[in-house]
């Protein structure tokens, strides 16, 4: 399957995918009942029952993705992995799946291998001393489970994002309703598994290499940290950009129009932020949080982002904030007083405006590249949870 092909459909439509009038149509799918096989039935209460063809499709997915159809219970999986049932339960929960009965058949040999691999990472002594039986001396069980949660949380969002992208692509290009587009994707997504999984490994290694490089550069310039458990270890510049009057605007839009606006907002934000050397922490519906290691980079990012969004095809009215300070990173997010301040400052900004605190404004005005920006104080406001504050306005010189 080429990169231009999704669900067996190419941009150069084959004769089999054209009507007599020459109109493009999506390929027939077993799940939709348009090819051979019995159609979906229903039980007396009206609940849909998968057809023989649909069951065959699901089994094929399981064989490809899980290495075979499930034949093992959780108890058997734990025994084969050489560990206890309790750890198997935590393994399954940490991946974000609902509890299953110990003797319910849900697992395959690939689950056994994954559980064994996770168990091998755990330091059996769990007393802080290295364990020669585990790679690298082993980790505390809680840390191993946290690593698994991190991967699983990311994968849960990733596969949903990928599936929805494919559904949208098929629906738009072949003018299909949502249900029909999903049936096409379900029947043909296996054709993308190898390329998507290979790309996942590549992207993960690229990001890990970049993070190692940033971390090495940062710690090389650090002095010995002040003692104390309450120290926020990371010095960062961060802020928010959100859409002005989003709720009112969304109420007047249809589903497709709203989806297009949010897609444009998010894709533009990610492109602008990453291309300038910063990172997107998260998107929150009508807002995006960005972060940078350097204040000058953050200033370039936030000013460019406001300009780009307001001049783009959607011509979005946005407002933004920028704060420098110390934070702590946890579960892929960042926390600390600068985050709280940035979230309050963005609410004080006018459409098209960027707000900073005084300390950040003075640091930017007195640092390298100061001639590229202008900062000035605004009127004092009352910020929720912070009391009276005086925001500063940021703009390009």
Image: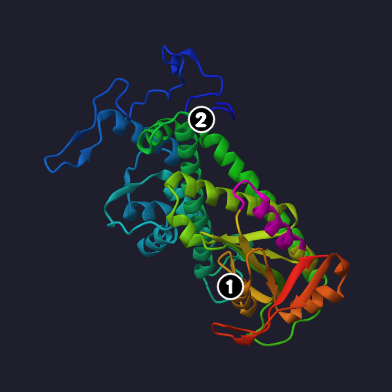
- Which quadrant holds the C terminus? bottom right
At x 38% / y 44%, what residue is drawn? 108
- Which quadrant holds the N terminus? top right
- Quick one: SS at disc 1? helix
Residue 392 percent across, percent down from the top left: 72, 77
Res 368 → quadrant: bottom right
Of the residues under marks 2 and 1, which one precedes in the sequence? 2
Disc 2 versus disc 1: nearer the observer: 1
Res 147 → quadrant: bottom right
Residue that numbered label 1 is attached to: 347
Residue that numbered label 2 is attached to: 6
Residue 16 - label: none
Residue closest to the eye, 231 or 255: 255
Work out whether 50 lies above or below 223.
above
* Range of residues picked out in magenta: 300-315
- Quick one: SS at disc 2? loop
Residue 276 percent across, percent down from the top left: 75, 55
At x 35% / y 32%, what residue is drawn? 57
At x 25% / y 35%, what residue is drawn? 50
Relative horizontal placement of residue 167, taking residue 77 as reference (left or right): right
Q: Is residue 57 magenta?
A: no
Q: Main secondary structure of the magenta part?
A: helix
Work out whether 156 lies above or below 370.
above
Q: Is residue 120 visible?
A: yes
What whole-number distance in Å separates the C-alpha atoms at marks 2 and 1? 42 Å
Mark 1 and mark 2 in contact (Cβ < 8 Å)? no
Residue 121 percent across, percent down from the top left: 54, 61
Relative horizontal placement of residue 5, taking residue 252 as reference (left or right): right
Residue closest to the eye, 165 or 396: 396
Relative horizontal placement of residue 358, taking residue 13 as reference (left or right): right
């Amino acid at each position: 399957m080429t990169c231009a092909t999704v669900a067996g459909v190419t941009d150069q439509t084959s004769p089999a995918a054209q009507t007599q009038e020459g109109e493009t149509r999506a390929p027939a799918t077993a799940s939709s009942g348009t090819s051979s096989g019995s159609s979906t039935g229903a039980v007396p209460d009206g609940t849909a029952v998968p057809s023989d063809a649909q069951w065959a499709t699901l089994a094929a997915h399981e064989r490809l993705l899980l290495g075979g159809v499930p034949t093992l219970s959780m108890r058997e999986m734990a025994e084969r992995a050489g560990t206890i049932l309790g750890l198997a339960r935590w393994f399954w929960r940490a991946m974000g799946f609902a509890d299953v009965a110990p003797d319910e058949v849900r697992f395959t040999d690939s689950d056994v291998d994954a559980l064994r691999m996770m168990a091998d990472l755990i330091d059996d002594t769990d007393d802080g001393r290295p364990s020669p039986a585990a790679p690298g001396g082993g980790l505390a069980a809680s840390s191993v489970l946290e690593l698994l949660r991190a991967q699983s949380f990311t994968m849960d969002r990733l596969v949903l994002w990928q599936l929805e992208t494919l559904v949208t692509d098929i629906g738009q290009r072949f003018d299909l309703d949502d249900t029909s587009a999903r049936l096409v994707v379900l029947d043909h997504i296996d054709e993308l598994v190898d390329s998507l999984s290979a790309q996942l490994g590549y992207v993960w290694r690229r990001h890990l290499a970049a993070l190692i490089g940033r971390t090495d550069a940062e710690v090389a310039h650090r002095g010995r940290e002040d003692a104390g458990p309450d120290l926020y270890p990371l010095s960062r510049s961060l802020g928010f950009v959100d859409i002005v009057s989003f709720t009112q605007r969304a109420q007047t839009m249809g589903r497709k129009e709203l989806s297009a606006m949010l897609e444009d907002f998010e894709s533009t934000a990610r492109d602008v932020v990453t291309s300038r050397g910063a990172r997107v922490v998260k998107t929150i519906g009508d807002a995006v949080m960005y972060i940078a290691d350097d204040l000058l980079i953050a200033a370039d990012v936030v000013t460019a982002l406001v300009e780009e969004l307001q001049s783009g095809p959607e011509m979005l009215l946005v407002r933004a904030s920028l704060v420098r300070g110390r934070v702590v990173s946890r579960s892929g997010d960042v926390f600390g007083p600068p985050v709280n301040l940035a979230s309050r400052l963005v609410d004080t900004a006018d459409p098209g405006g960027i707000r900073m605190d005084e300390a950040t404004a003075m640091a930017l005005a007195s640092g390298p590249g100061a001639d590229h920006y202008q900062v000035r104080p605004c009127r004092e406001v009352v910020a929720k949870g912070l009391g009276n504050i005086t925001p500063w306005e940021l703009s390009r010189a």
